[in-house]
Image: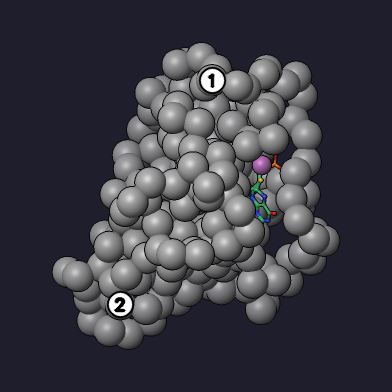
């Protein structure tokens, strides 16, 4: 796939292990449900909800993989307490998606949608963070099916459930709404440095009522 390479970034890793985490060697596979089969002719990446022009923006697989490509070295912290450090992810920056398919001015949150209706909600600022990436590659190789091929989100500064594998689109929202794990007992924000693991730890303003 012929991406134009922009730049490599090395600032989303190297801070060590967040509290309560342990180092994992190798790369385990962690998710709920089956691994979806990729059907390129049916696949599309859809930006919808409160877009600036109020229409949906859709890229097919060929178009999506032709968007500007960059790399980010980032750590992955699973809320079940293992962390994988220093992977090099390659893909399309979330900021690029925000530029090409801009949200309306009153958008505050983004729902990231994946196959089988899996979802995760992010504050717009977390989504727009410099290192948030729609990854297609890890360590120079295409993602494998079980790790999210063709596209997964990587949000280096949040727990890994905030990064859906098998992403199919994003929804711009003018109010917060909980995603799949956020409705099922996990923290609405999910900052590993503050050990925001479970929804019972949420303070006022951290998320919509359960
Ligand atoms: N679609 C989808 N994405 C998902 C999940 C899931 O259940 N479904 N689990 C998340 C969790 S909890 C973790 S720790 C990471 C694990 O990514 P890995 O299997 O590539 O290590 O994927 C995240 N993305
Ligand atoms: Mo996880």
- Which quarter of the figure has residue 80? top right
Badge 2: how crowded within 10 Å, few (<14), some, or many (20+)? Answer: many
For residue 35, side relative to residue 85 (left or right):
right
Front-lying residue, 140 or 2:
140
What residue do we see at 62% from left, 22% from top?
Answer: 21
Q: Is residue 82 among the parts visible in the rendering?
A: yes
Q: Which residue is mark 2?
A: 50
Q: How is the image coloured?
A: one colour
Q: Position of residue 119 (x, y in %)?
A: 57, 64
Query: SS class of the residue under badge 1?
Result: loop
Q: Nearer the viewer, residue 100 or 198?
A: 198
Is tag 1's residue or tag 2's residue first in the polypeptide sequence? 1
Q: Which residue is mark 1?
A: 19
What residue sits 63% from the left and 59% below the top? 184
Of the two numbered discs 1 and 2 in the rendering, the one whose residue sits closer to the viewer: 1
Residue 72 visible to the viewer: no
| Labels in figure, total | 2
Q: Quadrant of residue 198?
A: top right
**Beta carbon at label 1 within 8 Å of ligand 2:** no
Nearest the viewer among 67 and 201 is 201
Quick one: 155 or 145, which is closer to the camera? 155
């Amino acid at each position: 796939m012929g991406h134009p390479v922009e730049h490599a970034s090395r600032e989303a890793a190297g801070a060590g292990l967040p509290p309560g985490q342990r180092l994992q060697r190798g790369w385990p596979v962690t998710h709920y449900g089956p691994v979806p089969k990729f059907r390129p002719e049916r696949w599309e990446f859809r930006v919808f909800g409160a877009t600036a022009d109020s229409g949906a923006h859709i890229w097919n697989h060929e178009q999506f993989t032709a968007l500007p490509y960059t790399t980010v070295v980032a750590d992955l912290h699973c809320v079940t307490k293992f962390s994988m450090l220093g992977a090099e992810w390659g893909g399309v920056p979330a900021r690029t998606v925000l530029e090409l398919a801009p949200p309306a001015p009153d958008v505050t949150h983004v729902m990231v949608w994946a196959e089988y209706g899996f979802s995760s909600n992010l504050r717009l600022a977390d989504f727009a963070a410099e290192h948030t990436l729609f990854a297609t590659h890890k360590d120079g190789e295409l993602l494998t099916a079980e790790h999210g091929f063709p596209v997964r989100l990587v949000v280096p500064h949040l727990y890994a459930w905030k990064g859906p594998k098998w992403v199919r689109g994003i929804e711009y929202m003018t109010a917060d709404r909980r995603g799949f794990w956020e409705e099922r007992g996990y923290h609405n924000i999910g900052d590993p440095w503050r050990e925001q693991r479970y929804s019972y730890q949420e303070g006022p303003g951290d998320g919509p009522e359960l």
